Image: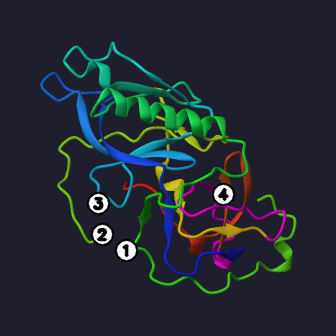
Amino acid sequence: MVNVENTEETVKVLKQSYLEKRKRDHGFFGSEWQKRWCVLTKKSFLYYSSEKGKQPKGGFFIKNTVAQIVQNIRKDSRRDCCFEVVSSDQHIYQFTAGSPSDAKDWVEQIQFLVKDTLSTSIPWEDDEETYDDVDSIKSSPGVVRALPPDREGSAEEEDIYEVVPDQEEFEEFETINDNRYQTNTGITAINYRDYYQGLWDCLSDNSDELSFERGDLIHILSKEYNAYGWWVGELDGMVGIVPKDYLTLAFEI
């Protein structure tokens, strides 16, 4: 694998702003809506506790989602500012934007990405905003160590924010494997400690390696080759080995 970014590390951002996210569960006296800094990238929609947040509180993949304007989830003056996104597993995410035009723009941007999910590239403006991760590792790791021959053919911020009284529940991410567990209530849950984000772009050199871009959410299926610096990960339905030094935890647990 090759590190194609050796200097300033950035993630392409298509749109970002504060939105109010509708909570899945809220108490009788609790607020139904929660202010979140939302970031739309080429492959995912992530939301943070604030604009300076380093780790996302949750999100979903853009692939196979459906976005639309809705006007029946609020009864106040902002009812025309609402939109919802239905993920591939039929989970519904509802948001309130700052204005009707802003809500429409969010929907159009998501729809654009969905249509281009299978494209090899998406045109980006030269003056497009980027996310600078100045607190991540300041220098790229060295050349990734190769695995020994016996693995050939294997398939296998400086800113601190207040603690939210009621911890927000992480939303489910699309996955293709069965690395889940059953709760006492019978509801299927996901182990978020298995999700990592790419720190740098990596291009695969062999068929059993997984290519990914900085900011991609990768589901780690196995750490069988941890001693050699490699894990087995899954991204967009593809499974392969990935260098662990190129990854960081995606969620605050």
Query: Disc 2 to disc 4, how far (Cα)?
Result: 27 Å
Whole-percent x and y of residue 103?
37, 30
The part of the chain drawn in magenta is 205-229
Q: Which one is in front in this view, the residue at disc 2 or the one at disc 3?
A: 3
The answer for how far apart the CA atoms under marks 2 and 1 are is 6 Å
Q: Amino acid at mark 1?
A: Asp
Q: Quadrant of the N terminus?
A: bottom right
Q: Residue at x 65, y 61 (%)?
A: 212
> Mainly helix, strand or loop, the magenta region?
loop
Does label 1 or label 3 sit earlier along the sequence? 3
Residue receiving disc 3: 52
Q: Residues within 10 Å of mark 4 (few under 14, many from 20)?
A: many
Q: Secondary structure at mark 2?
A: loop
Disc on res. 135: 1
Contact between marks 2 and 4 (CB within 8 A): the answer is no
Q: Is residue 38 visible?
A: no
Estimate how packed mark 3 is, as few (under 14), some (14 to 19) or many (20 or more) residues with alpha carbons within 10 Å. few
Where residue 248 appears, x then y in whole percent?
Answer: 49, 66
Q: Disc 1 or 4, which lies upstream in sequence?
A: 1
Q: Is residue 134 left or right of residue 224?
A: left
What separation in Å lies between label 2 and label 3 (alpha carbons)?
8 Å
Q: Residue at x 67, y 52 (%)?
A: 234
Left or right, 241 with respect to 150, comes to: left
| Left or right of 94 in this view: 240 | right
Circles 1 and 3: CB atoms closer than 8 Å = no
Is residue 151 placed above or below 211 in the rendered structure? below
Report, in whole angstroms, how far the alpha carbon at label 1 lies from the one at label 3: 11 Å
Real-space CA distance between mark 3 and mark 4, rounded to the nearest whole angstrom: 28 Å
Asked whether residue 115 appears in the rendered view, the answer is yes
Give the residue number, with chain letter if any, for mark 4.
233
